[in-house]
Image (cartoon, rainbow, N blue to C red):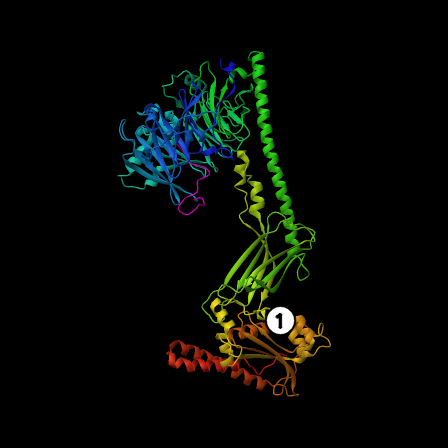
Amino acid sequence: MASAAPRVRYLAGFCCPPGGLAASKSRVLCHGAEVFLSTGREFVYVYDQEGGLLTAAFRFPDQVWHLELLAPRRLLYALCARRGLYCLSLDRPGRSRSTSQDDRDSEDSDQTCPVIPVDPDACVLPDAALCAFTVLDSVLVTLVQGPARWKMQLFERPSPGEDPRPEGQMGEVELSTYTPPAGVPGKPAAPQFLPVLCCVSPSGSRVPHDLGGSGGFSLEDALFGLLFGADATLLQSPVVLCGLPDGQLCCVILKALVTSSSAPGDPNGLVKILHHLEEPVIFIGALKTEPQAAEAAENLLPDEDVHSDCLVALGHLGRMLAIKARWEESGKLVPELREYRLPGPVLCAACGGGGLVYHSTPSDLYVVDPSRGSTLLSAEQPDEGPGGLPSVLRPASLNICSVVSLSVSPRMQGGGTELLALSAKGRLLTCTLDLESEMPGSARMTAESAGRKIKELLSGIGNISERVSFLKKAVDQRNKALTSLNEAMNVSCALLSSGAGPRPISCTTSTAWSRLQTQDVLMATCVLENRSDFSLDQGWTLCIQVLTSSRALDLDSACSAITYTIPVDRLGPGTRREVTLPLGPGEDGGLDLPVTVSCTLFYSLREVVGGALAPSDSEDPFLDECSSDVLPEQEGVCLPLSRYTVDMLQCLRFPGLAPPHTRAPSLLGPPSDPVATFLEACRESGSQPSGPTSLRAEYLPPSVASIKVSAELLRAALEDGHSGVPLCCATLQWLLAENAAVDVVRARALSSVQGVAPDGADVHLIVREVAMTDICPAGPIQAVEIQVESSSLADMCRAHHAVIGRMQTMVTEQAAQGSSAPDLRVQYLRQIHANHETLLREVQTLRDRLCTEDEASSCATAQRLLQVYRQLRHPSLVLL
């Protein structure tokens, strides 16, 4: 008897990925004693229930998403991801076998079976966008994922004994639009939920039900006509039901689709939407709910056709739709449609004998009876009259969890029901159910049944304990992520609310020259200091961006940036982290100035939150499934810390100020050619210097620029740190405050100094007091003139730009304190402004002329342009 058989029996185990099997891409089919199953990988297994062993394993070129069996012809159809549709003949598996020991070792450890590589010629319909299919005796229906719409295609299947490839396309129609998932260009991403296709035939159809594939069923004529209309009934045409991932349940009449290819009209009018579940459709099936019909269905022979009177569809989140025909009191036949809410998320479902529907969730396997509504294990009566659907369904638990694929065996000796199930861990199970013997009024429990109950309880306890361990690990990871997020929120609020005051987390930058091998390199040192009460742990990264300006003499060159990322590991309160990185010169010996060093703290939400929501070693399908929808869209949070600009005044070196025994042997920046170095060493001591820099310094006058500043303005700005120091000396010290040589300049009280630029050119800074006599009617204005001289025009411009930048900052700070300027001669200032505008217009004219003149004429133009530039670099104005 069924009640004497074990309720759950382990048959075989299969390889399982770390996250468990995917419910939408696993499949179990049963035909006689043979079981055909796929686990979402590239293998399709054949298991013999009578022998209790695996007989074959077909290896496909990619993952197998769906299986269908055409039993009368012994043909197995498999949908291979991004490859197309394959057809295998089960009567001749040995002809294509190519089994090796490596193939055996790569399979399951407890059982070995022949591994049969599938021949590429078995691909009967190559199409990378194919997502679903169903098979009839003479036609093949496919669903293709187009650029923005689903497309249903109908192909003619060949007769038995011929080439299994479809002979040609018989019809095509487009379904609803959809949003394609993001993926790598040229390789579309695998959909999370696949569409569901099945073929529905009327009870009077000429095509017997046994000639259809494993995804079809028959409906009674009354329900068939109400659902699909008079056309389908008169044509006696099969209808394809399609459940889409967006929740739509639509249908297409096959014979009408065939004739639409040659008849005029809109083919999209052939698509009829039956219902919208508003969640991905997981299962479409049919069953008998009438007591007499269900009893008659149980007494049918295996080859006899079964006509169902109720259509059901299940959604991923647990919404169930049931439709059947019902007579109204007025004598009119109408469709009765009801929606139910079942426990979810639904992983798989199946319809069994006696009008039962089985559906699996990550935590349990349930059975419901739409004909009665009440739980099977109670004595409650139906809450609706005969022929109607109940208002509420009460599922009964079978205490089996994480079933990802389910199939109902068509017949079992002694009554009852046998289910074939594939668990998320890759285990093939058989579940024997005898629901009637467990209802109230049955015989008293025997010792054997008591032992079986105890085993079932122990098995359930073990499953729950295993799931609790996974949940506990997930909770621990999420608690750790929440703690890290709380710390990140506190750090962000502390940085954003600090305003102009001292920041709790700061990054200071300083520069210094260092000798690396044979070259002098300008090094930047960034010090990240944590003065807050929080720690910077997992997820924090210090990003340092070095942005170099375009070359002064190359107007067409673009800016370039280099970003360094340094993971911040356990930076607790009161600690600091120091990072040193090179700024230049580059391989060409040049150093583009100014250089901007930007420091930013980056917090990676993907690293912290993503790892907690999607644990890599979780085997619970529910955790893996729910995590993908709540992962953060943003990669992380950026918190700016500091921005530091390195200019020419900070990069100057002063070899003449250093003591003789500490002077570096060479401060000319980039290393010279070895041959040139040897010739320089062999040159006579009395000879003239050579090289482009020396020649330019000897034969060309130096480039000069100056700027005048009111002495009163400088005294007000420098009074805090330079009291008792001559104004010219204090001004030079202020300009070189961020240079390493400022201590020597301060100790010697210098007002002029000669340094060396990074490229080796001389740069001379001269600070002297002057009197401006023509600008103020009250008398001369005492001013300080800062003059920059260099044999290199580019280095002079860089140094002049650095001086002007400091002056602008000083004038802005003094203006904020309310300083007032003396009376000035406005007419004199207007005349100076007009002269400068004239010079600027002449500069534009000369530059335009250089673009059109030949080489001989452009020499004079260039000389005049340099003269105008010299006049512009010596303005007659003063900063007040």
Decide which of 434, 474 is in the foreground and name it: 474
Magenta segment: 180-197
Q: Residue at x 39, y 81 (%)?
A: 857
Numbered label tally: 1
Q: Mark 1: which secondary structure?
A: helix
Q: Is residue 422 above or below residue 649?
A: above
Does the magenta stretch mainly form a helix, a strand or a loop? loop
Q: Position of residue 246 (x, y in %)?
A: 45, 39
Q: Residue at x 65, y 76 (%)?
A: 731
Amino acid type, mark 1: Thr
Decide which of 715, 447 is in the foreground and name it: 715
Q: Visible in this render: residue 686? A: yes
Q: Residues within 10 Å of mark 1 (few under 14, many from 20)?
A: few
Dividing the picture into quadrants, the one containing residue 852 is bottom left
Q: Position of residue 641 (x, y in %)?
A: 62, 58
Dividing the picture into quadrants, the one containing residue 268 is top left
Q: Is residue 852 above or below residue 283?
A: below
Report the quarter where the C terminus lies.
bottom right
Q: Position of residue 235 (x, y in %)?
A: 30, 30
Decide which of 324, 490 is in the foreground and name it: 490
Q: Is residue 615 magenta?
A: no
Residue on which the image places disc 1: 809
Q: Visible in this render: residue 330? A: no
Q: Is residue 735 above or below residue 256?
A: below
Q: Is residue 182 magenta?
A: yes
Q: Position of residue 433 (x, y in %)?
A: 50, 19
Decide which of 469, 118 is in the foreground and name it: 118
Left or right for 224, reference 350? left
